[in-house]
Image (cartoon, grey):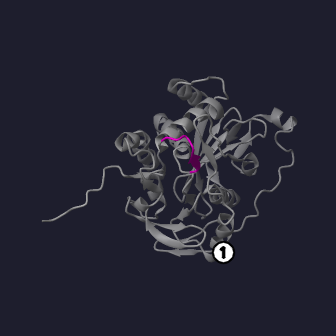
Amino acid sequence: MLEYQVVPAYKRQHYLPAVYLKEFSGDRKPTRNSLIWRYDGSLSRQVPVESQCAEDYFYSKERPAEAEKVFHGMENLYPKFLARVKAKQNPTGYEYFGLILMMLDLHLRGAAYLNETGGEGIAAYRMRFHAFKQQLLLGGLHESPTDDQVAEHLRACWRVRVLESVSGNQFLTSDHPSAWASLFRHRKQLDIVVLPLTPRFTAVAFDKRVVDVTTNCTTAEDEGRLNRCQVVQALRAVYTSAELDAENRNWVGEIFAKKRQNKGQVNRNSWQATLLDGQHFREFSFLRSVTPELVNAGEIPRERPQLFATATAGCGAGRNGCARWAI
């Protein structure tokens, strides 16, 4: 008699979908089985995309199929958008809107926040999603905002641009890649979201009432700052299409050695969200403030300090040849 072990359906649940992470494998036609370089601050190795950023029943053990279906719509739309970007075609308005939703959701659905709700991961996700809609996005104007109100606000106030690296540097990503920031100290609302899409492209979503993106490409200095934001943003690992060189591995390792286990927590009554300091974004060449009155009020310093000293790394030897990062 032969015995077979049956793995329960939807047991392994990804908090960062493979459809996103596979784009950093370096393969011309990446799949869930493609290899990607992973560095956790001490060990650099190639791993299958599908093996990363997943836990058993991360969202739900009681209703795993139902929990997984929550994310299927955005995950199905994302490859269509990305295919247009890589082909230098214009995505549709619907696809751009879907990208904004994906950028927001990758932060909300991730593993950055300790679950203290007493319920499953999907309950914690829904709590974060409600707190995000009510406070970070709409500023507390609606006690229980509907999905239609959120969609109307995003369509009216938010825009997204895809920026291309033209200097030869590559973008890296992490296990918590959607970086959020509020640009002003006393305004506790979300103003900008940055998400690397591929080693060549990064997306920037922004509240057009506050800031504008003025170009379609990045400078070498921008690329260094964006990559450093990913290292700061990461939970346990960064991912690249080719292996980081020794100098950059040492620098990343120093940052990782100081990391907290979680970036915040969520319980039944509140969500402690972690946003990057808005100052991290004020030196980007592609950003322009559209609210000069906030400068006069002291929200934005007139003399903007240099945030990062940038250096261009050497070539990291990978199976796809030579890659370069500004970090």
**Front-most of 59 and 197?**
59
The quadrant the N terminus occupies is bottom left
Q: Which residues are magenta?
A: 112-119
The image position of residue 10, as x and y in percent, is: 35, 49
What secondary structure characterizes most of the magenta part?
loop
Position of 133 relative to 266 (above/below): above
Position of 133 relative to 306 (above/below): above
Q: Tell me if 44 is positioned left or right of 254 in this view.
A: left
The image position of residue 264, as x and y in percent, is: 64, 47
Query: Which residue does the image show at 55% across and 24% down from the upper left?
Result: 149
Query: Which residue does the image show at 39% across and 43% down from the upper left?
Result: 68
The quadrant the C terminus occupies is bottom right
Question: Which residue in the protein does label 1 denote?
Answer: 247
**Front-most of 314 and 36?**
36
| Residue 34 found in image quarter | bottom left
Q: Tell me if 222 is positioned left or right of 26 in this view.
A: right
Badge 1 marks a residue whose secondary structure is helix
Q: Amino acid at mark 1?
A: Glu
Residue 159 seen by the camera = yes
Neighbour tally class for label 1: few under 14, some 14-19, many 20 plus, Cα within 10 Å: few
| Residue 301 found in image quarter | top right
Q: Report the number of numbered marks.
A: 1
Is residue 313 highlighted in magenta? Answer: no
**Front-most of 139 and 95?**
139
Query: Which residue does the image show at 72% across and 51% down from the upper left?
Result: 285
Position of 134 relative to 184 (above/below): above
The image position of residue 58, as x and y in percent, is: 45, 49
The image position of residue 165, as x and y in percent, is: 60, 57
Residue 90 seen by the camera = no
